[in-house]
Structures are given as C-alpha cells and as structure tokens.
Amino acid sequence: MQTIDKYNFKAKRAIMRVDFNVPLDKQTFEVTDDTRIRGAMPTIRKILNDGGSAVLMSHLGRPNGKVQDKFSLKYVVPAVEKVLGLPVKFASDCMGDTTKSMIDALEPGEVLLLENLRFYEEEEGKPYHLGDDATDEQKKEGKARVKESQKDFVKNLAGYADCYVNDAFGTAHRAHASTALITAYFPENSMFGYLIEAELKAMDKVLFSAEKPFTAIMGGAKVSDKIMIIENLLDRVQNLIIGGGMTYTFVKARGGKIGKSLCEEDKLELALDILNKAKEKGVKIYLPVDAVNADAFDPSAKTTVTKIDQTPDGWMGLDIGAETIKVFSEVIDNSKTILWNGPMGVFEMDKFAKGTSAIAQAIARATGKGAFSLIGGGDSVAAINKNKLASSVSYVSTGGGAMLEYMEGKELPGIKAIKG
C-alpha cells in the first residue's frame, strides 16, 4: 500500500478527497467551525511542499443531486485560504471542459477546489431525480441509469490527476464515487492523507492495544444506535459508562420509574441482555445513580434532582446528577484508555450541560495523567470544543458515523478501497 510519507508529489497533480462539509452561518454563509478544514492542511501542505498541485473535492450538506446555492463550496474558499495562507482557485462545477481546462493550467504549488460533488447523483449513486411516487420498477431503472453514468463521472474525476489521496475520514464509511470507486484508476498511486492515517492509528490503539483499565463512555438518545459498538467493546473494556437518554431504557428494563423520560420500549430485553453479557464477561457497567429532571423539554423548564429510578410522573431526565458525576469521574480518573461517544444529557441547553461538561473535564484530567483518550461523535466533539479541551485530550475524531462503524468492527469502503 502506498503511503503519503514515501510518495513524492513533485510535478504531480493530486486529486484529494477532503471533508469540507463544515457548518455555515445561515445569514452570511461564513464558515462557523473550521476544524475539518484545519485537519486537511498537513496533507495539502505535503503535496505543495513536494512541488505538486492539489485538486480538492468534497461534498457539503445534502443537495440530493441538485445544484443549490446554499450548498455551494464557494462559501468555503475564504476559510480554506485563511488557514492555508495561499489563494485557492474555485471551479464552479466538478465536471465539464471549463473545469478540466482550469485543472490543466494548475502550476506546482497551486490549489483548486471543485464545486460540491453531491450536485451530481453519480457521487452517491442514488437516483434522487425520482419523486416519492415513483414505482419500484422506475426506481430500479433509475438506479441502473445512475450507476451506469457513475462510471463516466468517476473516470472524469480520475482524469484530473496523477494520483489520489483520501483524507476525508468522515465519508470513509460510504461507498461513493470519490471515496471508494476512484481508487481503481490509481492502483499504485492511491493513499491515505495524514488525517485518515491519524484516525486509524487512534482507533486501532483503542481497539487492539488499549492499556488497562479501558473505559468506554457511551451516551446519546438510543440504545439501538449504540448496540453494535457496545457489543464489540464488551470483549475489550473493563468499564462501560452509560449516560444520556438511553439510560432510561436500561432503568425501565430493571423496573425503575422513568416518568416521561426517553425510552425505547422495544429494546428493554436488549438492555437486559447487554447487562447480562457484561456481567458474564466481567465488564463493570456504570449507570447513573441520580438525575436532573425537567417538567418540559425546554431551557427554562423547572428542575428537580432524584434517584435515577425515581423520576416523578410527568417529568423527564435531561442530565446526570452530582452523585453520578462523582462516580463517573472517579472511574475515568483511574482509567488508562478512554473512549467517549455521546453526551450525558441535553448539553445544548446550559441548564442540562453540567454532566457532559464534567465528563469532558474528567477525561482531560485523566489524559493529563497519562491516559489515552479518543473522542468521537458530533455531540461529544462539540462538548469537548465547547469546554475548550480539544488540546487536552489525546485525539478528537473528525468522523462520527465512520468512527462508530469502524469501532463496531465493520469494514469501511473508503478504507478498504486503498488498503485492499
């Protein structure tokens, strides 16, 4: 497998899949968080410093195969230029003769960003042009048509460059044209960028060479969203901390009172099964012992604190309580490897953010004492950034869905396409 460190980009044109799917201000269309842009910089600079040129391609949002101004990557260009410190050319289409001419004119040391790949159905291979009322036969024919035209789409992208670099971990779990299919045109010249290399290294460290005690912290709304990763981790971790909305499926399964807290009624047996499997494998599961309850899902709601299994009727648990913070923090404090995915409560509301912030701070403290910490998933990353702790943990993953699938033990198409 080709590696970016060993590859010399001198006089080469690289087509690089980046993840510039960044948040934009709804009024000004300015980038509000440039984390993903900064993440791509080491790879872009390597290409340019070697004496090569870079053609960057990405998606933004979900335009579903239609050109939509609000999803144009032209709004991302200023942020890329600011971080890179160089001018960035922009092609207003990722296909066509004009774009090809712009690319052909690129000089060593220059960068060009293509317009949103998902303005074309061929990127995802889905017939978005069909309406909801399309028949099964029409859907089948539409999918076949898009798949056929996808071949030309991929061939055109590949024709822009001498080599291919994938540094978009956030889309590595998708078998898209720009992540999985394009590598066929570069059998000897496809490679991961520094960001994906770092992502894989961090996840493999946690999965395969974790120093004990290894603690996984799973939060979020639903057990069903995390069941695969939990089951894969039960053979690896010593401690499993569970928080967030999915807590209450476990609490109800054990006979507790949960008021009107979030609960997956059809997953009660599954919750008990997880608890039993953990016990059999010698994994210590930590559920919250107390909670901050609210009488409404509202920032200004009235609150009360009760034991986790004594939620009053008509109330809902929206954060972990002080006793739980103390217990969870102590477990984290004594851990050598920590994986965090999912908040402890509705941390978007300040009134219910204390638990999630406390966990973020505990992880940072443990990291400072020598633990290895991996943070993944949009909400966990947002919580780390909100508390300005990104530099105080070992690694913050850029790919929520991709990280989850990798940690579940699934094969990611964008990774397999290069690794083989």
Image (cartoon, helix red, strand yellow):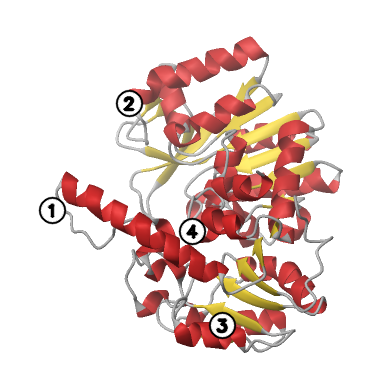
Inspect this view and state whether residue 20 appears. Answer: no
**Which mark, residue 133?**
1
- Return the residue at label 4: 177
Inspect the image, locate mark 1, and give the three-letter code of the amino acid beneath it. Asp
Inspect this view and state whether residue 52 appears. Answer: yes
* Residue extending farthest top: 280
Q: Left or right of 380: which side holds 313?
A: left
Q: Position of residue 110 (x, y in %)?
A: 69, 85
Inspect the image, locate mark 3, and give the three-letter code of the amino acid beneath it. Val
**Which mark, residue 77?**
3
What is the C-alpha distance between the residues marked 4 and 2?
Answer: 39 Å
Inspect the image, locate mark 4, and give the three-letter code of the amino acid beneath it. Ala
3 vs 254: above or below = below
Q: Mark 2 vs mark 3: give the one in front.
A: 3
Residue placed most toward the observer, 26 or 134 = 134
86 vs 231: above or below = below
Mark 3 burial class by Cα count in 10 Å: few <14, some 14-19, many 20+ = some
* Secondary element at image label 3: helix
Q: Are marks 2 and 1 in contact (CB under 8 Å)?
A: no
Task: Quadrant for residue 185, please give it.
Answer: bottom right
Q: Quadrant of the C terminus?
A: top right
Q: Position of residue 183 (x, y in %)?
A: 60, 56
Q: Earlier in the sequence, mark 4 or mark 3?
A: 3
Mark 4 burial class by Cα count in 10 Å: few <14, some 14-19, many 20+ = many
Q: Earlier in the sequence, mark 1 or mark 3?
A: 3
